[in-house]
Image (spheres, rainbow, N blue to C red):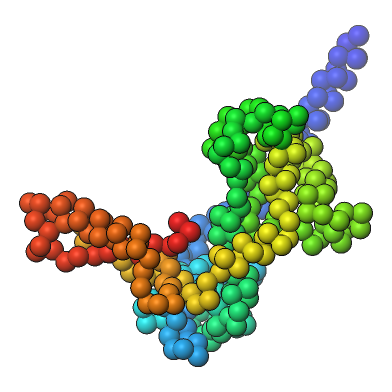
Amino acid sequence: MKTSTRSGIRTALFTAVLIALFAGLGAYPSSALLQSQRNIPAPTGYIQGVVQSEKGPEAGVWVIAETKDLLTNFIKIVVTDDQGKFMVPDLPTANYKVWVRGFGLVDSTPITMKPATNSITLKAATAKTPKEAAAVYPGNYWLAMLEPPAKTLFPGTGAQGNGLGAQMLTQNHWINQLKSGCNFCHQLGNQLTRSLDHVYKADPSVHTSVEAWDRRLKGGVRGNSMYGTLSTMGNPGTLKQLGLDRSHRQRRSAARAPKTERHRAQYRRDAVGCRRRSLVHARSSHDGQEPPHRQRRRSRLCRERRSRSAGGDGSKREQHVFNRHPDA
């Protein structure tokens, strides 16, 4: 009995020593690495220059510097000013791929360089077609084109009714379920989620967009979870909404893509005179005139801002009017 007890104690002590030894060995490189990182001064490198296209300096476009030379992938993005100038600050020493992306442009060919004091010129190219330009639009731009079921269809009456889930009491419930159930795990509106080409290629038995969405939501390790979200939203009705026929999508895309449009980040001034940079949409209309409803809204906003000015007298203050993105 005593021998057995002593043997158990020795085994426990030996195990504890081994655990402590391995824990120490595993922690040493990490702690040494952290200590070495603390001793590294803050990065002071930068890349500066100007973005030019065939139309001149490009204002309000993104300049992206990225590298894989560091311990983790490192990406820094800045926006050009009104003269197309930029500076990417606080860069650790490494080789960076630097390139340009912007609304109305195609991605430029990356150049490889290290942070330096000399100024560089990045060449940007204007997209030849609206479709080519839209390829780099953010996912949220495309997500905004998704048409939820009409408000008149709520509350849902289930699979035997209008195909929308009985828990979907209003259109807002359906939209919230889409965002919290789908967007919680992945982006919506990016190339992978707005295209069904890979589904048709993977499964030749799929012939319609409704079938493709049904197949997509069943696939992968998260298929059960995705299909559960679909069931809550209402299987038949939601699949029908997601799988609008291709001709309908083409008509809708054509209606949403004006012939001449450019998006730029411009300086705007708010009612109290504070400057801020924001994304605005500059569009050339066919007749050079705004639609009547926009003219009325613009006039109303001007009157409201004048009435909110100091002392209620807006005649002494400069009149500033906001341009708004048509899809906002």
Query: Which of the 4 image quadrants contains residue 130?
Result: bottom right
Residue 99: percent from left, percent from top: 57, 78
In the image, 323: left or right of 99?
left
Tell me: residue 288, above or below residue 4: below
Name the residue: 81% across, 30% down.
14
In the image, 143: left or right of 4?
left
Tell me: residue 192, above or below residue 179: below
Give the tally of numbered discs.
Answer: 0
Residue 127: percent from left, percent from top: 58, 80
Q: Is residue 116 visible?
A: yes
State the residue in front, 256 or 192: 256
Name the residue: 63% across, 73% down.
131
Q: Is residue 22 visible?
A: no
Query: Which of the 4 image quadrants contains residue 278?
Result: bottom left
Query: Which of the 4 image quadrants contains residue 249?
Result: bottom right
Quadrant in which the C terminus appears: bottom left
State the residue in front, 7 or 169: 169
* Residue lying farthest to the top in this orientation: 1
Residue 32: percent from left, percent from top: 61, 54
Name the residue: 60% across, 83% down.
128
Tell me: residue 267, above or below residue 125: above
In the image, 327: left or right of 193?
left
Tell me: residue 150, above or below residue 58: above
Residue 323: percent from left, percent from top: 35, 65
Name the residue: 37% across, 82% down.
83
Quadrant in which the N terminus appears: top right
In the image, 89: left or right of 19?
left
